[in-house]
Amino acid sequence: MVELSSTVEACINRINRRADFISRNEEDILADSLAACLHYFYTGLESIFETIATEVDGGSPRGESWHKKLLTQMSAEIPQVRCPVISPASQEHLDAFRAFRHPFRNLYTHKVDPDRIFLLAGELQVTWQTVEADLLNFLSFLAGLDNARTT
């Protein structure tokens, strides 16, 4: 999670310098950079979710829409296994990042709508704060399970 925090911080620093990029007529460079940040942010979380699905849930979704299914799986409680990893609010926010991931990976960066990039970038900090709190709660849940097993 430390690496994700660093990625988010770097993105937010870039967002805060948007006026500088505009003044130099380089907003397209900022958009490309932010698009990469947003992609790395979501794929970093997705990697965490895949690990949880495999190690805790006993399996990760497969098939064409596995990315969406994984996000849904992380917002669901699995009775007698685990609490939800993320809240419904986090799932909703992250679904926009998930949907952005596909065009970013499969189109040239200059074909991705800059307005969409700046909109998502503007939601990054709040989304990360919500998701990070969810993940810390989930880690506390796991620690509680571990403590229950050892006592």
Image (cartoon, helix red, strand yellow):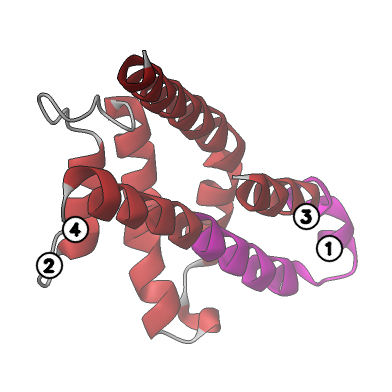
Q: Are marks 4 and 2 in contact (CB under 8 Å)?
A: yes
Question: Tag on residue 21?
Answer: 1
Q: How many neighbours does mark 1 have within 10 angstroms: few (below 14), some (14-19), or many (20 or more)?
A: some
Foreground disc of the pair 3, 1:
3
Q: Residue furthest front?
A: 151
- Residue marked by disc 3: 14
- Residue marked by disc 2: 62
Q: How many neighbours does mark 4 have within 10 angstroms: few (below 14), some (14-19), or many (20 or more)?
A: some
- Quarter of the image with the N terminus in it: top right
Q: How many neighbours does mark 2 have within 10 angstroms: few (below 14), some (14-19), or many (20 or more)?
A: few
Q: How far apart are marks 3 and 2 (CA)?
A: 35 Å
- The amino acid marked with disc number 1 is Phe
Q: Are marks 3 and 2 in contact (CB under 8 Å)?
A: no
- Looking at the rendering, the stretch of residues picked out in magenta corresponds to 14-41
Choose between 90 and 26: the one closer to the eye: 90
Q: Is residue 140 left or right of residue 91?
A: right
- The amino acid marked with disc number 2 is Arg
| Residue in the picture at 35% in, 54% down | 51
Return the disc, 2 or 1, that comes first in the chain's sequence: 1
Where in the figure is residue 72, as x and y percent of width and height? 19, 43
Q: Do the residues labelled 2 and 1 touch (CB within 8 Å)?
A: no
Choose between 128 and 62: the one closer to the eye: 62
Question: Tag on residue 60?
Answer: 4
